[in-house]
Image (cartoon, rainbow, N blue to C red):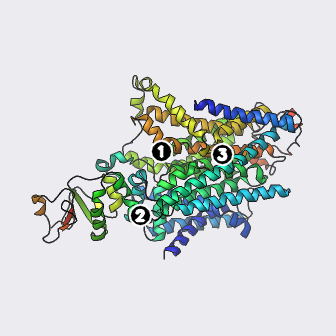
Amino acid sequence: MTVVGWLLIHALFVAAGGGLLAALGMVRPTWRSALWAVGPAHLAGVALIVLPLIALGVAGVTVSLVTVLVVGLLEAGGLFAFAAMRGEPGRATLPTVLGALRAERVLIAVLVVGVVGYLLFAGAALTDAPIGWDAAHMWELKALALYHLDGVPDQVFTNVGALAPFHMDYPLLQPMFEATIYHGLGHEAVQYVHVELWGLWAAAMWTAAWLLAPGRRVLTWLPFVAAIGVAGGPQNSPTLGNADLTAALFVGLGALGLGLWLEKRQSPHLVLGALFLAAGANGKKEGLVFAAAVVVAAGAVLLGLRAWRALARLAIAGVSALVFVAPWLIYVRANHLPSGDTTPLSTIFSHGYLTGRIDRLGPSIESTLGWLVNSIWTYAAPALLAAAVVCFVVRYARPLAIYYVTAVALMICALLWIYWTGNFGDLPTWLSLTGARVVGSMAITSAFGVAQIASSLLATRDPQPLAPDEAEHDAAPEWLALSGRARAGSLPASPAQSPTK
Amino acid sequence: MSWLTFLLIAGGIVAAIFAAASLLLGGADRGALRVAAGAVLAVGAVAVAFPIAKNSARDINGIRLQVHGTPPDQAKEKCIVDGGAADIVPLVQRLRADLPARAQYQVVGRLRPDVACLTTNMLPRTLVDTPRAGDWLVFTDGVPAHARTRLRSGSLRRVTNKLAFGQVR
């Protein structure tokens, strides 16, 4: 029964996510294309099923196996029906460019086998992992309550008198995901669930590759995905059962989705980006802040480009994402759930609060940047800065560079603000407990950003000319556009530059 | 000085890109820099991926060896032990075995290590402030005489001298 349940629940995730990808025109109706989309479909399905379950749960609806099945089947059925009515697949399905050189193919094979082998080995290593302290007090506690009590029970979720110190306001993506897995298995599996959390990371790497691959030479993006995929930083959270990586991978993929949309202006990327950002915002409290940073960065770039139609689309996508974010925030507000680590704005801006704690900034900067230049996060953030500098020098893909650097910079600033103003008194302990894992969103976003920028820099042609309705007629202003000299440079000019180059 | 390290790494990559463009592509014009940037970044990523993969595999193998063979109950009880309440583990195990799945219980005595950890271990059995008939009293510091009178006769089960539980009549 357990195996059947496992297959059932994962098939449901893949069906719902696959329905979305098909509806967006991102999957061709072939076995090869469908198989290649299984990883992204799983991850999109997790977001698509879990986010409505959170909304239903906080609204007081029973969240049992039946609810999970109804939500999943309705979504999958509706989306596949939409895909069937839509007809032809969209443009985000171009084949991957493997490269003609034998050495290139060998290196690709080595990287792929290495990353897949490592991800499988690490997953197998976590089968007996115990529940870490934080997970036992927050994530697993909520997951078990959601599973055993079929919803969001007051005994655990609003019992402020007993549970106030244990971050009752932390959002529910990971607990609801774990509870959904337990519903599928038919029993709780507090050790196996670590493997599922690691599986989300593996699916994220797959999704990044799947998003980056169309029309690009594999070796222009694979090394970055491989490097972050085998990094040591992501190990910590799934091992302990924490939610940092779950939030970070969704924020990173959301940033990549928006980055690809900025480059190509294809709506499927915007939809997926918004969905992943909504999931990231439901992953952790800082996930919400980091997801907002990504949207603000994208908005700032579009504002600079005076791309009003695109800005309107981004606003619509942002509001749609908020529909999935709002239920938990409303529930927290309505039930007066205390915030365990943040300080009210009225206190922050009261006289002397900020200046009295200015000495917290130095160690916070040291810790945050220190982890970003640690090998466990693969030096992705400084590499992003270097890539951005080159983009400015060569006047190519500057909006992309601005977008990613702004997003990561805003995330860093937000994190520093939290450390500066947070009410955790012992800063060194706080930094040592959280520093290595909360920078994950920045490192993963940086890695995906470098991958996109590098493959863009090395592209000799655009993947496909933009259709007039998609090109938006929002030409980049001169300060962001590719210069005439560069167009006539040593590389062949693109037949149809995308709006953000 | 992590900010300096950050800038030095970024600066080093930029310098490597300029060097690659100048030395390998015949000049630091925009086209050459574009190619050099993509190539240097990609080669750099490959270069760091291998040693990082080796370290990560070693680390995760260390975790595997460390947690190998942990039974599911112990996986849950880790927070009790880490919270300095290892002595109540036998009580929690007996409660999980003897109390029905939807039972409600009140803790009489010091609640250890804390409500959240205990709830994680006891779910779907839930902690209540005011027990009703049929609910359970869990004693962590001996059985006070006044509490004994509230129990159904014969329902008191002792785990140790101080740890016990019984059903409210």
Residue B133 position, x and y percent, is 18, 66
A329 left or right of B26?
left
Residue at x 66%, y 57% (from the top left corner) = A115
Nearer-the-camera pick, B74 or A258: B74
Q: Quadrant of the N terminus of chain B?
A: top right
Left or right of A179? Residue A439 is right
| Residue A172 x/y as whole percent | 46, 53
Chain letter of disc 1? A
Which of pointers 3 and 2 indicates the residue nearer the eye? 3
Circle 2: element type: helix
Instruction: Give the alpha-carbon distance from disc 1 to disc 3, as whole Å.
Output: 22 Å
Q: Is residue A285 visible?
A: yes
Tag 3 or tag 1, which sits nearer the N-term?
Answer: 1
Q: What's the CA distance linking mark 3 and mark 2?
A: 35 Å
Q: Residues within 10 Å of mark 2 (few under 14, many from 20)?
A: many
Of pointers 3 and 2, the one earlier in the residue sequence: 2
Classify A169 as above or below A59.
above
Q: Secondary structure at mark 1?
A: helix
Residue under disc 1 on the same chain as residue under disc 2: yes
Q: Amino acid at mark 2?
A: Tyr
Return the mark for residue A8: none
Query: Which residue is painted at 64% across and 49% down in the image?
Result: B52
Residue type at numbered disc 1? Lys
Give the labeled residue for mark 2: A147
Residue A285's tag is 1
The chain ID associated with circle 3 is A
> What's the residue type where badge 3 is placed?
Ala
Q: Mark 3 packing: few (<14 Cα in 10 Å), some, or many (20+)?
A: many
Which residue is disc 3 drawn over? A447
Q: Which corner quadrant of the image does residue A333 belong to? A: top left
How many numbered marks have been drawn onto this rendered protein structure? 3
In the image, residue A348 sits, relative to residue A81, either above or below, namely above
